[in-house]
Amino acid sequence: MRKGGQPELSGRAGSLGGPGLAGEAGRARGPGLAGGPGRAGGLGLVGEQGRAGGLGLAGKRCLLTGATSGIGLATALEFARQGANLIIVARDRARGEEALAAVRAAALEGGGIGGASGKAAGGGGRDGGGGDPNSDGRGAAGGGLSDGGDRLGDGGAASTLELADLSSMRECDALARRVAAGGGLDVLVNCAGLFATRHVSSHEGIERQFAVNHLASFVLTGGLLSSLEASGDGRVIVVSSDSHRPGRIHWADPGMGRFYFGLVAYEQSKLANVLFVKELARRLGPGSAITVFALDPGLVDTAMGNKAGPSPSSLVWSLRRRAGTPPEVPAAAIAQLASEPALRGRSGLYWKDGREVEPSRRAKDPDGAQRLWKLSASLVARALGEG
C-alpha cells in the first residue's frame, strides 16, 4: 500500500490478490485490492444545474474518449472554453481532426482560460449519446499520434489528437501507455459509447458493445491510475445511463453469442459501468488522490441510437430523442464533476441532474462488482495474450 491510501498497481490480471490489467512491466495496469469501501455520501446540487463550475479546468491535462460527436464533443468544447489542455480520442483521423478544429475555435471563444458554458458549436446534432459509437463512427481504425501539439487559445491551452480503436484492448492498452508517458493526468472522461442491433465481435473476440462501453474504460482507467494519482486530485468520470437499471450481467455468456438482443447488451454494458465505478472506488479506498464517478446524462438529443442503420430501435430512438436535452447539459455536469472542489474524495457517486442519486439494486451489489472486475481482467488478459 502506498502513502495516502493508494493501492499498489501490481499483480497479474485475473489474480485474486489484487489483479492488474496486465502483469508485464509497462503495460496498462489496474489497482490492487485496497481496504475499506470508497465513500459515496450524499451531496446535493453544486452550482446551478446546466452550468459548468468556474475556471477549475484551466491548465488541467484531460483525456476524453468519444470526443468527435454528441456528449463527448460538447464536453471537449466546454473543457476547451475553460482552458483545459485536451487529449481527444478518435478512431478516424478525419473526424478527429474536425473535432480538433472545433475545440480550437471553442478555446478561442473562451480566451483559453475559461468562460461560461455556451452553445457548443457542432456539439448538438451530430452523433453520440453516452458519447459516440467507438469515438468516430464507421471510419477505418488507426493508431498512434496525430500532428498533435496544436496551441489553443490566448491562454495557452493545448490539444492533441490520439487515434485508437476502442474495441481493441491492445489499442486501449497502447493508448494508455502513450498518455501515461506524457506525465500527470488531471481528468479522464470515459465517454465513448456504442449501440448495436446485431452481434458483432471485435477482432479480439469480444462483443463490441461490451468492449467499447465497458472494457475500454477498464483498460484506460487502470493504465492511467499512476498518472491520475500524480496530479494530486485526479478525477475519473465514466458515462453510464439510466439503461443500467433493467440491465444484468450475463455471467455465463457476456458476449451474448447464443442469444443477442442489442438493447439487452447495451443495458448490460451500462450496468457494468456503474459496477466498475463502485469497485474501483472500493479498491482506491479512503484518502486516495483519485475520485471516480458514474454519470447518468439522462435522455439526450443525439444520434447515438441511429448509427446502426434503419431498424425498429432506430425508429424508436428518433422519436425519443426529441424529448432529450441538448448534449451541452450533460457536458456541463461532466465539467462540474471534473473540477468541483467539494466533490474531491466522494468516489463512487452515481450522478444525475446535478446531484447524487441511487443506482439500481444490482449496481450496488458488492459481490457482483468484484465478480465483474475479475471477469473483465480475464477478458482483457486474454485479449492481450496474457491469459
Image (cartoon, rainbow, N blue to C red):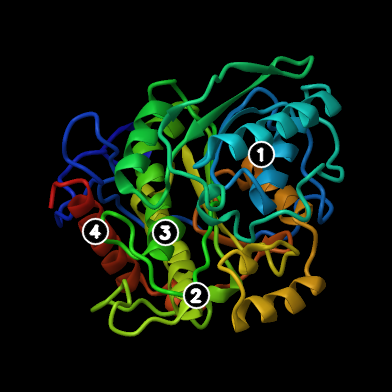
Q: Which mark is residue 197?
A: 2
Q: Residue at x 66, y 49 (%)?
A: 69
Q: Which residue is mark 3?
A: 214
Q: Residues within 10 Å of mark 4 (few under 14, many from 20)?
A: many
Q: Residue at x 34, y 56 (%)?
A: 36
Circles 2 and 4: CB atoms closer than 8 Å: no
Q: Which mark is residue 339?
A: 1
Q: Residue at x 62, y 31 (%)?
A: 97
- Rounded to the nearest whole Å, what is the CA distance between mark 2 and mark 3? 17 Å
Q: Which residue is mark 4?
A: 379
Tell me if residue 314 comes above or below residue 157 in the rendering: below
Circles 3 and 1: CB atoms closer than 8 Å: no
* 377 relative position to 262: left or right: left
Inspect the image, locate mark 4, and give the three-letter code of the amino acid beneath it.
Leu
Q: Nearer the viewer, residue 257 or 80?
A: 257
Inspect the image, locate mark 2, and give the three-letter code of the amino acid beneath it.
Thr
Q: Decide which of tag 2 and tag 4 comes sooner along the chain.
A: 2
Inspect the image, locate mark 1, and give the three-letter code of the amino acid beneath it.
Ser
Q: Decide which of tag 2 and tag 1 comes sooner along the chain.
A: 2
Q: Decide which of tag 3 and tag 1 comes sooner along the chain.
A: 3
Is label 4 in a helix, a strand or a loop?
Answer: helix
